Each structure stands twice: as C-alpha cells, then as structure tokens.
Amino acid sequence: MTKPNKTFLPGHEWGFVPKYLGAVQKHKQFTWESDCYSKNVAEIHGDFLDERVVHVTSTGRKNSTCKEFYLFATIDGTAEYRVEADEATKHWTAPILSWRIKGGKEWFDRVGIRVFKFYVDREEAIIDLVDTIKLFVPSDTKGPGEPLKDEKYVLDFLAAYSNISYERRPPEHYLVNIDPKTIKSGTAMGCMRPDGLASLEMWATGAHTSHWTMLMRDAQDELYVVESTAKGNYWPAPHIQKHRWADWVQLALKANMSVLMFPLDAEKQAKFDEQEAWKFINKSLGLPYGYHNFIFGWLDTPEGNNPFPVSSEVLEVLLGIIWGADTSFGIRLVGEALSFRLTGTWKTNLTVAEAANKAAEKGMTFGQLYSIPEQDSWVYSDGTSMVCDVFCCHIYKAGGLFGDLADKINCVEMHNRDFYSLKFFSLDQNARPEACKVADPDLDYCMVMGPWRVKTPQHNSVEPYAHMAERCAAHAPGWQNTPKGC
C-alpha cells in the first residue's frame, strides 16, 4: 500500500470514490461552492432523447493554480470533467455519455444529473484506482496460493482501513495435527484468505474472516466439509458442495487459507438434529453461490453500512454503470433482489433504474430500498441464494438450533461477523487439543491451518433474537453495531 497523501483516508485505496454534492434538473439549476470557485452554477441543456450536456458557470475564483475533478452522472450515463481555475469566470460543459437502460428516461426526469466531486485531482484518482485494483490482482487472478508480498498488500490495507490485523504463525504450525475422529457434526470452520474480494467484505462488515464452512458426518461416519463457494483461481468447483475432510484440507492448504474451528457447545450439540441438517444440505448441493443477496447481508441501513467514502447516491449510480457494462451480472447482483423488495417476486425483472423509480413512487429513497431485509423464503430464478455463512446458518436452522425463533430469523441477513458472534460455540482455551494449545496458546479455539493467526473479536457473544442482524449500522474501524440489539 502506498503512503497516504490525503487526510480523508489512510491510503490510496478507494480514494477515487467521489463525494455527492447534489443534482441539477432540467428546469432547476444546482449551485455549490468549491475549493476553486466561490460559486458554481450548473444547468442542463438537451434531454434524454438528445445529448444531455451539463453547462457550468464558475465565478469568484479563489486560487489561480487550483484544480478540481468532477463526475456528472445519471443512472445510465456519466461524464467527467477536470476544472482548472485559469479564468476568473469560467464556462465549461460536460456531455453525458449514455448507455440507455430501461427506466433511465424516467429516472433522469425525476432526479436529473447528479454532481459528484472527487476528493483528489484526476491524476491522483487514477493512482487511487490502480492501487485499489492491486488488492484484487494478482490475489484474485493467480493461485491457488499467493506470494507473501500480495498477501501483505491486502493485510496492510485491512490494518490501515479497518483496524484488522493478523500475526504470522510459525511454519511448523501451518497444519495442526487434529484427530478428525474427534470432530463432531455442526462444527463450523472460519477461513481467511487475504485477497481482494475478502478485503472488500471485511472492510465493509468488520469481519475477521472471509468464508465459513460446516463439518458434518454422514451415516457412515465419514467426515465432510460442506460449503457455498464460487469457482476461482484458488478453488476448483463452484456452487454449494461437499468434500471429504482429507481432500478439503489439501485444497485449503494449496489456497493458503488460514482456518479456525468453532465446535458447538454441549447444549447445542445435543440439540443439533443431524438428519434434518443433512436433508437441507442434500437438497442444497449444486445450488449456485448466493450472488443475488451477496451485498444485502451487510446493507442493513441506507447509509450506516457503506464504508466511507461510499454513499447511497454513489452506489445507485455505480449499480447503473455495472448494469450497463454487464446486464446479466447486474440482474444477478441486484436486479432480482430489488424486484423481490418491490413486487414480492424476481419475475418482474426490474432494471436498477426501474427499481429506483418504483421505490420513489412508494416514497422510498434508493438507500431505503436496499435496506429492506432479505427473506429466507425468497427463491430466485436459479434457486435459494446463499453465500457461505448464510448456508451455514441455514444448516443450524434446519438442525433446530434457533428453536422457536427459527421463523423470526433470516439467515440471509447475516454476514461473517454476525455468524461467528452467535452464542452457539464451545470456546474453551484449556479444553482444546494439545496441538492447538502449542500452536496458538492465547486463543480459545483451534487454528487448524494457515500462515496467519485469525482473531475474531465479539465471537460467541450474541444470543439469537428475533430479526437478528436486520437493522445494524456499523462503520470501520470501531465496528460497534448500533442501535444495541439491532
């Protein structure tokens, strides 16, 4: 991670995300003060059917060497503009490049063109973008293992942005000798692989893990690892799947995963219905990874879960850009989920623009729309949608661990940190196998493998409650959920 040269973020990563200032509409100007000029007035020329152009008049120059960088955007069009204060009064225009999506005209008529100002100039925004891409490349493109320098790049980001840190474990403890015969069904395993997607998830949620799996014994007492995952450079197969313990261990070692183990406590273990859990697992095998609700597990409030500098206005435009670039991915990421929130079914096939418009008709902002809690009962076009921890939560639900609260808890609203905070586990420093005590003496759970010691603050701390994790706001770096009992 490069050295920071700004005050609003500790580094360059994600520094290219702009600040929302307001919107200019067809018959309504928008005025703002900036670092370069005391007054900027924007107005729209043209309409949706013609070229839409933002005209800005800037007056009251403050500094002749000042430079600013702007983004003008609709949900289906953008324009960037770099302003240099080389004139006392400056007239400038920004034509909107549009890709047209269904509902875009109505969105433009309702909202206008949004004005965003970058926190940095154009050159630094490009540097920030490149440094952000470095989080994902090569960690998400090479594998299955990662060079130490690439892992450290991601870990340095997490330390600076989220106050999440990891200690290097001695090589002789990368694989702890645990007798698999002692492992019981319902034991959860948390994983951490420092790659780009993991850094985004952990920065957004405060989780110290990026993946969860479940250990289960079948009728022949064979130990399996079951999980919901995606095929990637470090994992050979997609979808909800199962592997024999020994096979999974080899895959995880090759992927450089750091893995911890959370066994159920005695009460929950006795209550856990393995047969019902296996019924749920078997009917779920082969289902796709839960892309449909991937982001909705942490977006519980309009603004309280967006990692700075992201805002709901930025997110709305970003989703429009994604929709224009890859419509099928946009449908999978948010389209069907937003349709469910507005119409009770994915089959209405609303575009992101149509969803925003329909929400406005109902008196909701886009942030309020995506904050509507996801429901376990929703079945998408390709089946029930579950990411890793959601799948594990569903196994516990099927196994009876939520008791009378089962119908009042939506597993799809949980992310990694919510899952490992469940007060279900037996975490006793002294009761661990001797090999775990030697490898990681200060932990109250076993690190099964991996180069990094994973600590999970607030683990095993929350008794399940109705509508758990549905309305929780939390920001880096403190990650204190608000309000209490959300």
Image (tube, grey):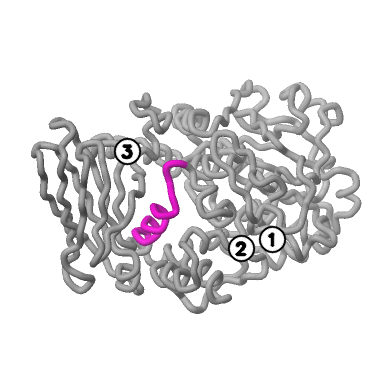
Residue at horizontal 41 percent and vertical 39 percent from the top:
138
Determine whether the residue tagged by mark 3 lies in a helix, strand or loop: loop
Q: CA distance from mark 3 to mark 1?
A: 38 Å
The relative height of residue 244 versus residue 99 in the rendered view (above or below) is above
Q: Residue 253, can we see it?
A: no
* Residue 243 or residue 3, whichever sits in front: 3
Foreground mark, 3 or 2, reads 3
Residues at circles 2 and 1 in contact by the CB criterion of under 8 Å: yes
Q: Which residues are magenta?
A: 308-322
Specify whether residue 316 is painted magenta. yes
Residue at horizontal 58 percent and vertical 43 percent from the top:
474
Disc sitting over residue 374 in the figure: 2
| Residue indicated by mark 1 | 410
Amino acid type of the residue that numbered disc 1 sits on in the rendered structure: Asn
Disc sitting over residue 119 in the figure: 3
Q: Position of residue 3 (x, y in %)?
A: 37, 24
Most common secondary structure along the magenta stretch = helix
* Residue 281 or residue 270, whichever sits in front: 270
